[in-house]
């Protein structure tokens, strides 16, 4: 049935009323990004001169890519980027596997003490990382590791200046386990029973039944794990002393000297924000649906 | 399932046996260390600072090429992350032999056992500016190639146009003259005539503003005992400083907004800038011959500026041949040519007379030579392990005062916090 003109006008008014606040909020969130990208093209003096007026958001004045050239002169950017990508991908990938398996065991397998264990895992959430960082440095510096020396596999002690020290402590994550446990609990257990009648073992039930039904939970955990892994600063700073092992966030400090090179800061932040934006754009649909279904935002 | 478990257990046993047979890394021969030069590890805070790194790289290359006994290998860290990296490395027992450090932290690191007495020839350390040498418990723990200095930057034409006397090192502005100059400049149209750098944070606050407190007659701690800040940081002189400092902001003579650096002065948005030597070349480019470098005002007890900057030390874990190598490297590095190169690349004041004579900017007739005269006003930040807490406590108190807090109450609280820290650490050995 076709709507009459007055209904159409009312619909347009409602849409307009909705779009005005949406536009304002979108602008508030996008202004810092525009400022960052635009400033990355300006010399320092112009950034500071424009900062208190609308020119700060406009690509006007003496524009160039000099700041980007400065970034590549000042820091080994591609090395830092490689380190961050490697560490983040492994933390997210291994974290999804380990934490979902833990969540599966806690939510769907009957065994003594699982509720107590879940409570203990959740209790660890109240301990801020900063309070355990220094003891953890001492601890990882004493852990055994394997090294190749003179063509032989040997053991040694100390994980400092390795990739594993940036990855392994962050694979198991209490909040991710809790989230998987909660989400898996919403999937009817009758499916497990049907699968077991068909001869499936626990891992088959996990892999073939539960995982395909838990897409939103995996997407949510992926987001929540990706951002802190990408933004990691304190831990890599403490455990990695070699420049060749540093991630992008530690690299940010290179630009804060006695006089901060603001143009280069903006160029560097633009470069390290692009991968995050790219990930978000590619997985936008999955992210939005995961937020809608899980009620958790990153 | 049972079979899988047995297989895994067997693999674990085989792996353990294989590794036991192979032994621990680094223990099998040891020929590399015995046959080659001894490695001396060095950490700097210079990552992201190409000018500074260039000089260090040159010194290390020259040293390594000058002899066959030692090889210095370096790792650089960004300054903002450096102290955290050092503390973490000390925790894990992974400090390098040579490390640089900001002057005020030297007593704390010496007291904490991170560093050992420097042990290089006193012929070198005796020639340095007193503020370029770090002393704790009557022993030299660190030495640096340079120091920095703060000054008042102004335009001669602006001062003359407003009938303001141009002060000299021998005849600096008095407090009344300085206050009057600020009010005159505000009336002349400068919204906030003085850029005092209050938009910055961290160590800048005690470095820049505790000399003003000292010029009033106060101090960060009672230096006769180093056991209390009572009387020094909350006495009548300190309160007078706090009220004056607060007045700069309430009267609109200085601002706590703006951008870090000297851009507002370079664009003539402020008439005076209280800033460091490192900004001088930029301002010379912007202002030209009109730039005048003035001493800070005499607020009662003479002009004062902060002293003590980045210096070199040797970690406590450095020993044997590596320790000899570290000392040999340091003695090599204090060559006047390197001291001058460092000063001219980094725009800081050379720590030796010979280095100054070789400097393009700081030698007699050099454009930045006035800064060398200001070092006579330098006061070291308190040489106590408590300084780490004094620094952050003073920053918090001064920021609160700037934002309108009651001066006496704020300084009393700061004294309580500092004294509590000293008491908790049994007086830090004093």
Image: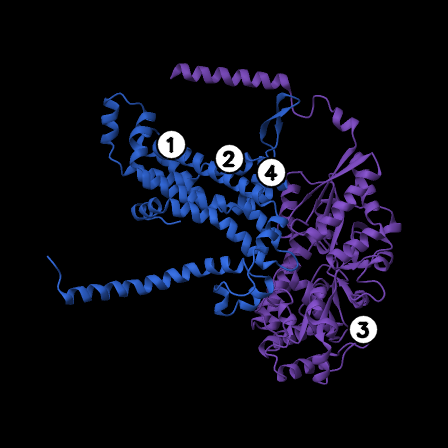
Q: In whole angstroms, how far apart are the C-alphas of marks 2 and 3?
A: 60 Å
Point out the tag, 4 or 2, that comes first from the N-terminus: 4
Q: In whole angstroms, how far apart are the C-alphas of marks 4 and 2?
A: 15 Å
Crowd tier of the residue under label 3, counting other residues whose Cα lies within 10 Å: few below 14, some 14–19, many 20 or above: some
Q: Colour of chain B?
A: purple
Identify residue for label 3.
Answer: B169
Same subunit: marks 1 and 4 = yes
Residue at point 48%, 39% (across, down): A170
Tag in front: 1 or 3:
3
- Give the structural element (helix, strand or loop) at label 3: loop
Q: In whole angstroms, how far apart are the C-alphas of marks 3 and 4?
A: 52 Å
Identify residue for label 2.
Answer: A168
* Quarter of the figure that contains the C terminus of chain B: bottom right
Point out the tag, 1 or 2, that comes first from the N-terminus: 1
Identify residue for label 4.
Answer: A138
Same subunit: marks 1 and 3 = no
Q: Closer to the camera, B58 or A132?
A: B58
Q: In whole angstroms, how far apart are the C-alphas of marks 1 and 4?
A: 29 Å
- Give the structural element (helix, strand or loop) at label 4: helix
Residue A165, quarter of picture: top right
Tag in front: 1 or 4:
1
């Amino acid at each position: 049935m076709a709507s009459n003109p007055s209904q159409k006008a009312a619909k347009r008014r409602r849409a307009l009323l909705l779009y005005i606040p949406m536009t304002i909020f979108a602008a508030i969130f996008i202004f810092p990004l525009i400022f960052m990208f635009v400033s990355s093209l300006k010399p320092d003096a112009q950034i500071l001169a424009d900062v208190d007026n609308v020119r700060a958001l406009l690509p006007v004045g003496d524009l160039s890519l000099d700041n980007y050239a400065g970034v590549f002169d000042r820091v080994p950017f591609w090395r830092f980027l490689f380190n961050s990508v490697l560490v983040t991908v492994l933390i997210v990938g291994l974290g999804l596997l380990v934490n979902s398996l833990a969540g599966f065991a806690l939510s769907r397998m009957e065994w003594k003490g699982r509720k107590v264990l879940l409570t203990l895992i959740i209790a660890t959430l109240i301990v801020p990382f900063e309070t355990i960082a220094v003891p953890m440095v001492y601890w990882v510096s004493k852990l055994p590791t394997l090294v190749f020396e003179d063509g032989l596999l040997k053991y040694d002690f100390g994980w400092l200046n390795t990739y594993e020290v940036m990855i392994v402590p962050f694979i198991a994550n209490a909040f991710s386990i809790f989230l998987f446990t909660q989400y898996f609990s919403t999937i009817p257990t009758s499916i497990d029973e049907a699968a077991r009648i068909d001869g499936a073992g626990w891992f088959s039930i996990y892999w073939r039944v539960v995982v395909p039904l838990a897409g939103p939970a995996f997407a949510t955990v992926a987001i929540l794990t990706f951002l802190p892994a990408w933004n990691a600063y304190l831990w890599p700073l403490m455990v990695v002393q070699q420049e060749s092992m540093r991630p992008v966030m530690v690299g940010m400090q290179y630009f804060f000297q006695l006089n901060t090179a603001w143009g280069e800061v903006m160029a560097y932040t633009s470069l390290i924000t692009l991968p995050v934006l790219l990930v978000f754009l590619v997985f936008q649909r999955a992210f939005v649906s995961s937020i809608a279904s899980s009620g958790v935002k990153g | 399932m049972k079979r899988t478990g047995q297989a895994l257990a067997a693999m674990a046993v085989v792996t353990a046996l294989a590794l036991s047979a192979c032994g621990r890394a680094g223990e099998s021969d040891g020929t590399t260390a015995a046959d080659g030069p001894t490695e001396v590890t060095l950490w700097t805070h210079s990552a992201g600072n190409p000018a500074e790194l260039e000089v260090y790289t040159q010194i290390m290359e020259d040293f390594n090429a000058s002899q066959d006994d030692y090889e210095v290998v370096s790792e650089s860290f960004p300054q903002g992350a450096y102290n955290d990296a050092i503390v973490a490395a000390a925790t894990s027992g992974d400090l390098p032999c040579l490390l640089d450090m900001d002057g005020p932290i030297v007593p704390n690191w010496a007291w904490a056992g991170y560093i050992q007495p420097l042990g290089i020839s006193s012929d070198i350390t005796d020639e340095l500016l007193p503020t370029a040498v770090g002393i704790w418990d009557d022993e030299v723990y660190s030495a640096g190639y340079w120091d920095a200095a703060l000054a008042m930057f102004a335009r001669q034409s602006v001062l003359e146009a407003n009938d303001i006397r141009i002060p000299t090192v021998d005849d600096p502005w008095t407090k009344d003259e300085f206050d009057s100059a600020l009010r005159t400049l505000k009336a002349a149209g400068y919204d906030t005539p003085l850029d005092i750098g209050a938009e910055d944070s961290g160590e800048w606050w005690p470095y820049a503003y505790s000399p003003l407190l000292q010029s009033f007659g106060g101090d960060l701690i009672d230096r006769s005992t180093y056991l209390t800040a009572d009387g020094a940081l909350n006495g009548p002189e300190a309160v007078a400083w706090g009220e004056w400092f607060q007045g700069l902001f309430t009267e609109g003579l200085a601002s706590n907004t703006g951008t870090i650096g000297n851009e507002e002065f370079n664009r003539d948005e402020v008439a005076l800038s209280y800033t460091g030597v490192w900004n001088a070349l930029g301002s010379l480019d912007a202002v030209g011959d009109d730039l005048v470098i003035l001493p800070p005002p005499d607020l009662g007890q003479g002009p004062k500026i902060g002293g003590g900057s980045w210096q070199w030390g040797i970690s406590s874990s450095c020993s044997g041949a590596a320790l000899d190598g570290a000392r040999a490297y340091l003695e090599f590095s204090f060559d006047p040519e390197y001291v001058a190169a460092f000063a001219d690349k980094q725009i800081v004041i050379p720590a030796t007379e010979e280095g100054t004579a070789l400097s393009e900017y700081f030698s007699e007739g050099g454009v930045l030579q006035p800064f060398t005269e200001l070092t006579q006003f330098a006061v070291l930040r308190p040489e106590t392990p408590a300084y780490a807490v004094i620094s952050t406590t003073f920053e918090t108190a001064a920021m609160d005062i700037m934002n309108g807090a009651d001066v006496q109450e704020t300084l009393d609280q700061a004294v309580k916090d500092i004294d509590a820290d000293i008491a908790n650490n049994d007086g830090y050995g004093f």
